[in-house]
Image (spheres, helix red, strand yellow):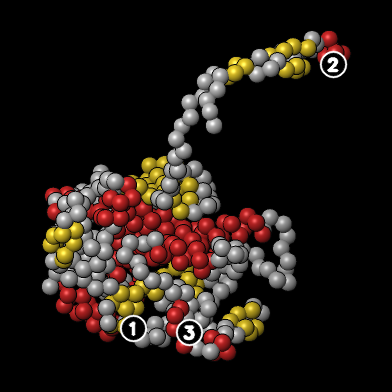
Amino acid sequence: MASASSSLASKQFLGASRLDGLASSDLGKLSVSTVQISVGPRTLRRLQVNAAGSIYGNHFRVSTFGESHGGGVGCIIDGCPPRLPLSEADMQVDLDRRRPGQSRITTPRKETDTCKISSGVSEGFTTGTPIHVFVPNTDQRGHDYKEMSLAYRPSHADATYDMKYGVRSVQGGGRSSARETIGRVAAGAVAKKILKQFAGTEVLAYVSQVHKVVLPEGMVDHESLTLDQIESNIVRCPDPEYAEKMITAIDTVRVKGDSVGGVVTCIVRNAPRGLGSPVFDKLEAELAKAAMSLPATKGFEFGSGFAGTYLTGSEHNDEFYMAGDGKIRTRTNRSGGIQKRQNTVTRDKHETELIARGRHDPCVVPRAVPMVEAMVALVLVDQLMAQFAQNYMFPINQELQEPFGSPRHEPANV
C-alpha cells in the first residue's frame, strides 16, 4: 500500500452540538452543516508480532516475570474472584516446598523465597483487581555462569534463546531457569484455594519414580493420601521404603556431579464435572500443555497413559455404575540434563568442551511436585470459571447436571 496525502470529500451531517436545552420543536430549526477531514501523509510501520508466552489462562490469567539472577521474580494474577481470603502465608507454604536449598538432594542455592503481595488484596481479602506478587533474588552468583556466556549447555535453552532472540540472559539461564516457576507456584496456591472453597477440589502430587526406582502401582492409596505423607521425606514419595531407595539413587549420581530424572504423579480429588471444551480445548489437552511448559519436562500421561496401549479396548474401558449416593461414577480411571563435562559448541560456532559450574539440582523431581500441583490447579480453576460462565447462567438440567460447589468425583490421575 502506497503512502498518500488527500482530503476527504465534504459530507453533510446533522449538527449535533449544544442540543442541551433545546425543545423538541427546535430540532427542525437546526441547520445542515458540512465538515472536512484532512488526512496527512501516512508512514507505514513494519508489521510486528508481539509474542505473549509468559501468560497463561483466559479467565484466571497469570503472567510470570523475572530472571534467575535478576532483581527478582513473581507474577500478576488477573481475574481472581473478589472476597477470597488471601495472604502471603497462603502462598508461602507452596513456595517453601519449591524453594532451593531444602536438602542435600536439591541445588545448594540459598533463597528464602519470601513473597510480597503489593496489590489486589485489601484487609485480607481479594478485591477482584490484579494481584501482584514479588519474590526478590538474594543469593545471586552470576559469575558462576561466565563459561556459559561463550559455550552452550547441551539440553538447555541457551542456544535456543540465542537463535530465537539474538540475545539472552546468560546468568542462570534467565527465563528458562526453574526459578521462573515461583510465579506459577504462587498463582497455583491461589487457584488451589479457590478450587477447595468453591468445589471441594484437592490437587496433590508426589514423586513416583526417580531414575530406575519405580514406585509400584497401587502402593499409594489416592483416596486417603495426605500432604503430610508426601512431605514426610526429602524426595516427596509417600512410601517410606521407596523414598529411601530414591534418595540413595540421587545420592549416587550427586557425588559424581551428574543428575537423574523421574516422574511426578498428580491426583485431583472431587474434580467438577464438565470441565474443558471440544474439540481443541479438551481438559486433557490443557493439562498436557500446562505440564509440558514446566522446565525439563519431557513427557505427559493422563490416566493409563502409554500403558493403555498394551490393553484391549474391552480391558481399557472405564465402566460406569450407579454409586450409593445416586451419582454416576466409573469403576476405573484409565482414560482419565546432565551437569558434568560435555562437548558442545560456542556462540561463534567453534567446538569446545564445557564444564557446567553453578548450583544445580542432582534431581529436580522433588522440587517439581508443587510446580505440577500449581499448573494442574491453574488449568482447573480457569476451566471451572469457563464452565460456570457458559453453562450455569440459567437453570441447569437437574436430570443430567449438578450444581457447582460440592464434592462429587473420583480421584483423577495425571
- Expressed as whole percent of the image width and height from the top left, the position of residue 343 reads 16, 65
Residue 409 or residue 28, whichever sits in front: 28
Q: Which mark is residue 215?
A: 1
Q: Residues within 10 Å of mark 2 (few under 14, many from 20)?
A: few
Q: The residue tagged with tag 1: helix, strand or loop?
A: loop
Lower sequence index among marks 3 and 1: 1
- Residue at figure coordinates x 27%, y 78% from the top left: 211
- State how far apart marks 3 and 1 are (Cα): 20 Å
Mark 3 — residue?
A: 309
Residue 97 or residue 254, whichever sits in front: 254
Residue type, mark 3 in image: Thr
Mark 2 — residue?
A: 24
Lower sequence index among marks 2 and 3: 2
- Expressed as whole percent of the image width and height from the top left, the position of residue 241 reads 27, 85
Residue type, mark 1 in image: Leu
Q: The residue tagged with tag 3: helix, strand or loop?
A: helix
